[in-house]
Amino acid sequence: MEVSQCAPQEAFRDLERAFRNWRAGRAGRPRFKRKKSLDDHKARLTGSIRVSPRHVPLPRIGRIHTQERMEKLLALLQEKKARILSATISREADRWFVSLTCEVERPDPVPREGEPVGVDLGLMFFLVLSDGTRIEAPKPLAKALRRLCCLSRQLSRKQKGSRNDAKTSLRLARWHRRIRNLRRDGLPPVPTGRAKTQPVLVVEALNVRGMVRGRLARSIADVGWGMFLRFLAYKAQWYGATLIIAPSDFPSTRRCSGCGWVEPKVPLSVRVFRCARCGLEIDRDLNAAWNLKPYGLTVLNGPTGSSMGRWGPHAIHRIAWGPRWPVVIGAAAER
Ligand SMILES: [Zn+2]
């Protein structure tokens, strides 16, 4: 197949960035991809890309019919409020997708100020907010998982390179795609809603990768926290909200939200936090949300009058690598 000249160019650009991130210590060393892998085939095309309501004409490839209608984007393009930067063609199992990266002009959000709301990400509930709101987790994976096991077992019995092997691996890849979609679409519409209504949200940084290795792996991967935090970060920027991310060693679940006492250890099985100093008894997740709220206040107001002890903002910069803690996204960051 004849390909556009920018496909390899863009691939090299990505590779360069991958090596730069590795050298800067932001990411692992780039690895080779499996050639036979059915997923993750991607090519990016830049240059002038135009769209019509139901088609994307791609250089060298031709007109591609799209499932999604694009009138909204077209209107923005005509008003010169949006610009298409690139088109990425990708394959998931046996389907091809094209996604357009666009630059869209948005009115500058009006920064909103107000009381921070602590947001605890949990397993029993997806979110527990310091105002007492609880939102349940979508658990699509649990149902789809049985079939996933069954399919991968089938695949392991097939003779490598045979026709049946190819057929089964396609079936498995399709099932993975299904799970991915379920996960993405099953995310509660909280990110948008909360970023619109709450001026300041405080969450805890998650070491999602590290946690997924543990015993809790399945249910954590299931609720898709990483995706949730990414959504929340950009929605906050759109709507003028501020997102404050507390470092992952902030003892949100071990600290007493009443008196500030920090318990040395609180196992996950303990659902009710009991303070050894003041005797406070409170739901574990709500306690965490209540701890994140004053943390947000300390970040916004500076360390003076801080009751956060060694987790006050001044102490947090000791993590030398990676982003500087606390990470503040949105309105407050520009102040
Ligand atoms: Zn206490």
Image: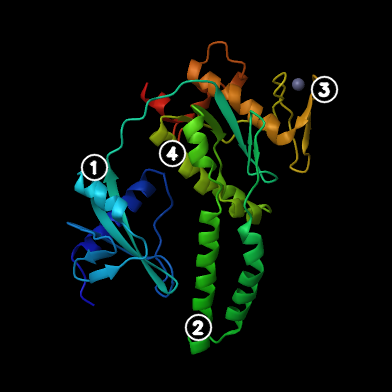
Q: Secondary structure at mark 4?
A: helix
Q: Badge 1: few (under 14), some or many (20 or more) residues near its Cα, within 10 Å?
A: some
- The CA distance from mark 1 to mark 2 is 45 Å
Identify the residue position indicated by label 1 in the image: 81
Q: Which comes before the other along the chain, label 3 or label 4?
A: 4
- Is residue 166 shown left or right of residue 204? left
C-alpha separation, residue under disc 3 versus residue under disc 4? 39 Å
Q: Which residue is mark 4?
A: 235
Name the spot of residue 222 as percent of width and height, x first: 60, 55
Q: Is residue 176 above or below residue 81?
A: below
Q: Nearer the viewer, residue 141 or 150?
A: 141
Which image quarter holds the C terminus?
top left
Rounded to the nearest angstrom, the CA distance separating label 3 from label 1 is 58 Å
Disc 3 under 8 Å from ligand 1? The reply is: yes
User: Closer to us: mark 3 or mark 1?
Assistant: 1
Circle 2: element type? helix
Going from N to C along the chain, the mark reached first, 1 or 2, is: 1
- When the figure is inspected, residue 127 is found, relative to residue 250, above or below; the finding is below
Q: What is the number of the mark on residue 167?
A: 2
Query: Disc 1 marks which amino acid?
Result: Lys
The circle drawn on residue 279 is: 3
Question: Looking at the image, what colour scheme do you see?
Answer: rainbow
Residue located at (75% from left, 36% from top): 266
What amino acid type should be assigned to the residue bearing mark 2?
Lys
The three-letter code of the residue at mark 4 reads Lys
